Image (cartoon, helix red, strand yellow):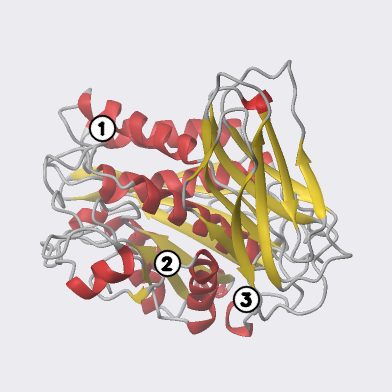
Amino acid sequence: MKLAAPRRTAVVVMALAGLLGTAAPAVTAAPAAPGTVPAAPGTAPATTGTSSVQALAAPDIPLANVKAHLAQFQAIASANGGNRAHGRPGYRASLDYVKGKLDAAGFTTTIQQFTASGAIGYNLIADWPGGDPNQVLMAGAHLDSVSAGAGINDNATGSAGVLETALAVSRAQLQPTKHLRFAWWGAEELGLVGSRFHVNNLPAAERSRISAYLNFDMIGSPNPGYFVYDDVPAIESVFKNYFTGLGVPTEIETEGDGRSDHAPFKNVGIAVGGLFTGAGRVKTAAQVQKWGGTSGQAFDRCYHRACDNTANVNDTALNRNSDAIAHAIWSLGTTGTNPPGTVRENAADVAIPDNGAAVTSAVTVSGRGGNAPAALPVSVDIKHTWRGDVVLDLVAPDGTVLPLKSASTNDSADNVIETYTVDASAESADGEWRLRARDVSAQDTGFIDSWRLTL
């Protein structure tokens, strides 16, 4: 996120041809893959051009993948004078890293060049084939750091979350109804230079084709809050519904309003939205009651400092916000026939006795009505030293047992981090659902870390 009062910067540029080439005609969205989180209901606003048909379900974004990108950005900074700032070799190396990942995944990438403060800067734009070229959904993050440090929370976190979501689009071979475009901006820390250049050089007709721009700047602050942009209520509701499903309260984002790359889009009338976990402002006691953390301490004590490195990231916030990015892309960019769904999660640890009695962890569903879906996603995260010993079942509110995983003497790997899909169409949706786990052999231990149900 840029400084509150950046110095004025001269920009001399020439737009690259082919940045906004014609996309393929709209196609029918592909079926959702196993291991997905259905979109929240009511995420089809006319203001963003989204179809009224229920959107496809989004995949879980692996935290390990996002953190691997952070490690790469840190390594790049360390090898290039300790930063990834505009005009410095660490910035271009960061851009080349992202571009290489996207090119290999089947995106069409374009490097957009500009000049700021006497140095050449770059934006990276990546287009996914297909979707309606007259309805472009963009998501972006600034890729540069300040010169003082590596800029891992600000803003390798946003850059990595957007990158991994784009790679998830490729892994799913998603066929969106909207045309999907992802962007990584240069020279944000000098005053939104890269994103402003991009918007200012878009012809009016091309601007009108952008249905929404979603911005992600600092999504893993070490003392995090959960802030949602409130510029467009229909987009805001997509994010708020997602976090409500996780039981995580949100607040309106005010600290960075107008200070990040959504501002140039907003200023020309394009709908914007996004997420933020806080910068230099101090977390209040009331916010600690909502989110935990430390009262009286900044959301990010290393904001724009040398200590903004890979140790300066809260994994839980990074994980939730990365999943929320994917949720928004799938919700606003696709249509499908999946039933409406809300995520219910129980993150309380439950020890699994070694070769002992079964244990359960419960989530309660209320207000859903009707029966559960025929393809009910059940995502589990179980830490265990020998996963073959673990038997898992989903127990419906009326006591019906729906098997998820059986024991196997040949499965010696550790941990069970999977999403299972069961036919629960004969079961009432409302009531207490339980994940039941049992260790059926001796000498190995574990616990239920968390699990979530989507219906």
Q: Position of residue 244 (x, y in %)?
A: 50, 71
User: Helix, strand or loop at disc 3?
Assistant: loop
**Disc 2 marks which amino acid?**
Gly
Q: Which of the marked residues, 3 or 1, is nearer the chain's N terminus?
A: 3
Q: Where is residue 62 in the image (x, y as percent from the top left)?
A: 53, 41
Residue at coordinates 23% horizontally, 30% vertically from top-left?
Answer: 77
**Disc 3 marks which amino acid?**
Thr
Q: Residue 225: which quarter of the image?
A: bottom left
Residue topped by disc 2: 274
Residue 57 position (above or below residue 74): below
- Residue 43, which numbered label? 3
**Disc 1 marks which amino acid?**
Gly
- Dot 2 surroundings within 10 Å: few (below 14), some, or many (20 or more)? many
Residue 330 position (above or below residue 61): below
Residue topped by disc 1: 90
Residue at coordinates 69% horizontally, 51% vertically from top-left?
Answer: 378
In front here: 46 or 252?
Answer: 252
Question: Which of the two discs, 3 and 1, sits closer to the camera?
Answer: 3
Tags 1 and 2 touching, CB below 8 Å? no
Q: Residue 208: which quarter of the image?
A: bottom right
Tell me how far mark 2 sits from mark 3, CA to CA: 15 Å
User: Helix, strand or loop at disc 2?
Assistant: strand
Q: Where is residue 332 in the image (x, y as percent from the top left)?
A: 62, 68
